[in-house]
Image (tube, helix red, strand yellow):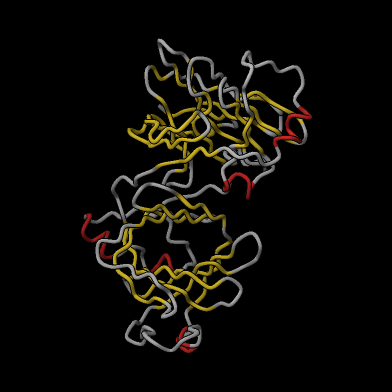
Amino acid sequence: MIALAVMLCTASAAACAANPVSKDAAADGDVPNGNYVFEKQIYMNPLSSFIAFDGYQEYYTITNDMLVLTDEAGSRQRIEVAIEQAELNEKEFQNSFEINIGVPDIASFRERYLYTLTDASGSEVYRIYQLDDELWLARMNRGSKMHWSIYKITRFDGDIPLKAVISGTQDATVHFLSLQKGFQSGYDDDTCYNITPDDIKDNSDYSIFKYGTSCASFLLYEDKVYPLGIGFGGPGLTSMALADLNGDGKPELYFTFSFGSGLRRSHAAYFDPATKQIVAFDYVHINEDMMISENGNGGLSLYSASIINMVSFVYFEIEKKEKIADVVCKNGRISLDL
């Protein structure tokens, strides 16, 4: 992952909200990195049945290569993007609406910049408009370069809610079981599930599997199976995240797991695809679960967490609480910055 730097506001919080990104930075082509929150709807395609009324809550994390959308409940959509900056042409802007109803007028803005966000398939999925002191986030109709919605967003310095979902399916379990050798769960009826989150499925070659009773969890990578932590007496694997913190071009798989029925022990670790090894962090969280996830700086952080809405060990939600540490890479070594 490219090293990412959040552009910090040095003025007061009020001034920071009013001026989400400096004009000089936009002129230099810098991406307006940081955390933002929905302020108001600028435009919605008349064919849409949705309107973002006042009080609508959505959060946005922008980095040099990623856009993360987080809804009010804490569920995230992570999109890896390539971002290109250019001066905004008013005529081209006006011509990028399928229906000429409610099209916003940008003529009054003096400074106008466009950031085009393209996903891995080459489709233009979002645009960011910097218009003087305002920042607009536009969702595009895939493949058409036409606007679907435009929201005004402002800098957010608070705590973004965060929740992840573990949801097991039977996808590719037959293939996984054909490769897994010598595993005995100790339970007669212990069904294996694929719990790979969509963002990991879409952005890596990792597949993660978990047994519903024993909570034993495994990684399938390049047709080889690797155990992921311990699940005996606890929920086992609780969260996962991708990041290339050592900058070798191959994202590591980071995960948290917990075990123990009397004294709950939560741990964090990662799989390094270069060495094909699981590396555990030297930290134990007692009597509480943990969650690992992207932070507003484009890196990863470790949080205390609560498991909620648990249907089973392969169907539950996990919600972050207090931050424990950042995951950092210094001198080629990945560790926790406690």
What percent of the width, then of the height, locates residue 255? 54, 31
Q: Residue furthest top?
A: 262
In front here: 103 or 196?
A: 196
Q: Residue at x 39, y 85 (%)?
A: 103
Q: Is residue 314 above or below residue 214?
A: below
In front here: 113 or 226?
A: 226
Compared across the picture, whether 76 is left or right of 104 comes to: right
Compared across the picture, whether 273 is left or right of 20 comes to: right
Q: Is residue 326 above or below residue 281?
A: below
Q: Is residue 159 above or below residue 155?
A: above
What percent of the width, then of the height, locates residue 141? 54, 73
What percent of the width, then of the height, locates residue 316? 46, 35
Q: Residue at x 72, y 27 (%)?
A: 225
Q: Residue at x 78, y 30 (%)?
A: 178
Compared across the picture, whether 51 is left or right of 179 comes to: left
**Rendering quarter of residue 193:** top right
Give the position of the C terminus as an image quadrant. Answer: top left
Q: Residue at x 53, y 39 (%)?
A: 167
Marker count (numbered): 0
**Rendering quarter of residue 60:** bottom left
